[in-house]
Amino acid sequence: MHIGIDFGTTNSSLAAADAQGNVTLTTFPWRDALTESFRSLLYLERWKEGTRSTIKSWGGPSGIERYLNADDKGRLIQSLKSFLTSHSLISTEIFGRQFQLEELIARILREIRQAAEAQLGKPVHKAVAGRPVRFVGAESPADDEYAESRLRKAFLKAGFEEVTFELEPVGAACHYESTLDHDELIMIGDFGGGTSDFSLLRVGPSRRRGQHRVLGNEGVALAGDSFDAKIIRHLVSPALGAGTMLNSHGKMLPVPNWVYFKLERWHHLSFLKSRETLTMLQSVATQAVAPAQIRALLWLVEHDLGYPLHQAVQQLKAKLSSETKAEFRFEDGDVEMREQVSRARFESWIQEELAAIESGVDQLLKKTGVNPADVDKVFLTGGSSFVPAVRRIFTSRFGEAKIETGGEFTSVARGLALRARDLA
């Protein structure tokens, strides 16, 4: 079997292809059912084994279940892929122990690999893995190379003996190509949690078994998480005291803004739960002009509510993809937020991100010299491909009839497995 792995910022998946090109996806238990999508998160707890104290972790669906059922919450970490370009975050302290970023990612990848081995009934030590055209935070090719090298180390730590990287939009193209009975010039739009990637390729039966021709690639280091951040900035943070004041010894000062900046980034949120930050927020709450809002923020950080907040933001975004108005709702302890949001309002918040995506698409067309009229199909994949404003970027250039979607969370893994077969 030939293995393809899509390790995403938000979701991951693993697919296996046989010599004939038949593809199967690894499934994972989730609430008395099975899912093909493995949430790219890690939940850690202090664990007692006899007299020995250790730190145990659970990833994906099992990590979510463990977190939701825990009375005394451990540490829930999301969006680890977004840290790969960071030269400052080499390791982090969890329960008094230092963990390298590669080790944390490896724990997620190891669970995915072991689930695949159990399902396939054979060892999995070789894979083709996806990577974005441009990693989050990358400002140069050297940054991308650094991020890829760290991701490679994580795969090796997870028990993989050999890993080959392929661009994620190329993986999506391989999946789309497998459905064709004729040649096409296609554009791929792959929208992940952290990156939006675009590729132009010539694909089809005459180019099968790895002979597709890549005309060009373009990447933008923003996607679903960036949309979420704007919802946090405009909707959540104001309800938690952003922009309010505190009275410090008779002097009016703004509430520290850096906390809200980190709140916008899922990969930073779990790191707010430190003794220093909690002490600071407790002090701010006693001096705040709007103490109830700061206490709500303190509750959110203290109880590590990043996952349920993320879910509430995701639900709003999903509803606004099919409805013109939806209610945002998040309630837990001292936190109570309910507000109606229109699609137009949400789209006004993400204008900067939409402009960057538009620019990425236009840059790819310009540097390849391809006229939109000559593109046969546009295949969109990933969660943000459902956002109407994102879809309009492509319909306005290529026409509604050319847009294809499908397998939004698994098409890249399927294509990477087929790519692994081609490279064998």
Image (cartoon, rainbow, N blue to C red):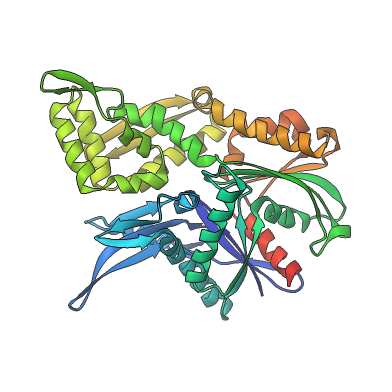
Q: Quadrant of residue 22?
A: bottom right
Q: Please, is residue 210 above or below residue 332 in the view? A: below
Please tell me in which quadrant of the rendered image residue 41 appears. bottom left
- The residue under the point 83% across, 42% down is 376
Numbered label tally? 0
Q: Which residue is outermost to the bottom?
A: 122
Q: On the picture, is 145 further left or further right than 41?
A: right
**Residue 98 pos. (x, y %):** 31, 61
Look at the image and tell me in which quarter the N terminus lies.
Answer: bottom right
> Can residue 411 be seen by looking at this rendering?
no
Name of the residue lying farthest toward the left: 249
| Residue at x 69% of width, y 67% of height | 420
Q: Is residue 255 left or right of residue 234?
A: left
Vertical position of residue 206 compared to residue 307: above or below = below
Q: Residue at x 27, y 27 (%)?
A: 241
The location of residue 9, given as percent across then percent down, is 50, 51
- Which x, y percent locates residue 365? 77, 36
Quarter of the image holding residue 57?
bottom left
Q: Is residue 309 above or below residue 23?
A: above
Q: Is residue 365 above or below residue 53?
A: above
Which sits in the foreground, 202 or 204? 202
**Residue placed at 59% from the left, 54% from the top?**
145
Looking at the figure, which quarter contains the C terminus? bottom right
Q: Position of residue 135 (x, y in %)?
A: 56, 48
Q: Nearer the viewer, residue 92 or 320?
A: 92
Taking the view exactly as shown, the residue that stands out farthest to the front is 142
Tell me if residue 48 can be seen.
Answer: yes
